[in-house]
Amino acid sequence: MANVGKNIRRLRNEKRMTQDELAEKLFVSRQTISNYETGKSNPDIDMLLKIAEIFQADVTVLIFGTSDMSERKKDIRCLIPAVIALAVLVLLYRYLDSWKQVLVKEYYDVGLGFFMYLILIPTLCLLTGWVFMQLMKLFMRARRLSGKGSAALFYVFLVLMLLYFLSVIPLCVETGIISLGNIFPCAKSLSQYPAGGETYFSFPSALHLWSSDVSYRVFDCPLPLFCCIWLLGGAVLWNGPGRRLSFPFPPHPRRKDENSQGT
């Protein structure tokens, strides 16, 4: 009910109605409307129904800020591209898996396997977790959590996720260039220095060692546990910080306080 007052004010402004006009239609005082909009008091169910009837809106618009139908359509629009992306990633995984086996048998090359395990599987699990939660919202009316705890969890996971990908990408790039040269002979030169030597491209030694150490520690993690962590991460990303990001910009000097005017 925390946002009911804001929703009443928004709908009233959309109808170009003053607080006095709304109060007259509801047979209450203007101060009562002001208290509703500032959150000092909340209307009861009967009053919510009357306000919704005056605004010609669904009562869910007053409570949640949007109607169930419009929110459902918005959720479906978000879900469709995510499902398409998930299907594309699954097909990509199956295609690369066949190439991975060829590279291992013929060249003893595990570079493509590194990319699939360290990058592609986490991305697949993240997207799967997000899609699952979106389906739960559509069919089970799951709601996003709010509060400092969910916000802290979101930002902590976001930072850890970025650190993870930044850590494993160097090794995936190094080994991926080698795999690219084995798959496409015309790209063989990409895996060697311009002088044509046999030394393969690599990042600075410190970064290479860090990336290798993190990657091999990841390989020690059981695959089911590894996938579950990223699936939960997808749910955390779906939930978000629990509130919209905002910045403390100073108020516009020309903006007047609506409540002080009583309109």
Image (spheres, rainbow, N blue to C red):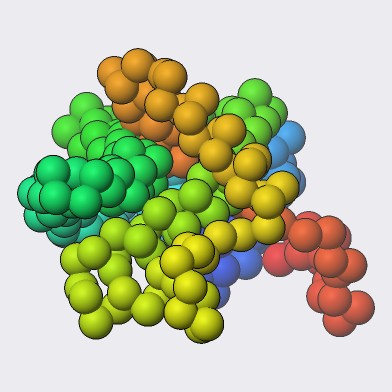
Question: Which residue is at a point 83% across and 59% down the rendered structure image?
Answer: 248
Q: Is residue 246 above or below residue 167?
A: below
* Residue lying furthest front: 197
Against 46, residue 61 (above or below) is below
Count of picture labels:
0
Residue at (17, 33) in percent of width and height: 139
For the N terminus, the quadrant is top right
**Residue 103 coordinates in the image, percent (x, y):** 18, 51
Q: Quadrant of residue 242?
A: top right
Q: Position of residue 159 (x, y in %)?
A: 64, 41
Q: Residue at x 64, y 40 (%)?
A: 210
Could you tell me if residue 51 is visible in this image?
A: no
Query: Is residue 186 toward the left or the right of residue 246 in the image?
Result: left
The image quadrant of residue 143 is top left
Q: Tell me if residue 226 comes above or below residue 82 in the rendering.
A: above
- Image x and y of residue 157, in percent: 58, 34
Q: Residue at x 51, y 83 (%)?
A: 194
Query: As rendered, which of 28 and 219 lies closer to the eye?
Result: 219
The answer to which of 149 and 128 lies nearer the viewer is 128
The picture places residue 165, in percent across and down from the top left corner, at: 52, 47
Between 34 and 223, the one nearer to me in the picture: 223
Tell me if residue 213 can be seen.
yes
Q: Quadrant of the C terminus?
A: bottom right
Instruction: Decide if residue 100 is on the left or right side of residue 144.
Output: left
Closest to the observer: 15 or 122?
A: 122
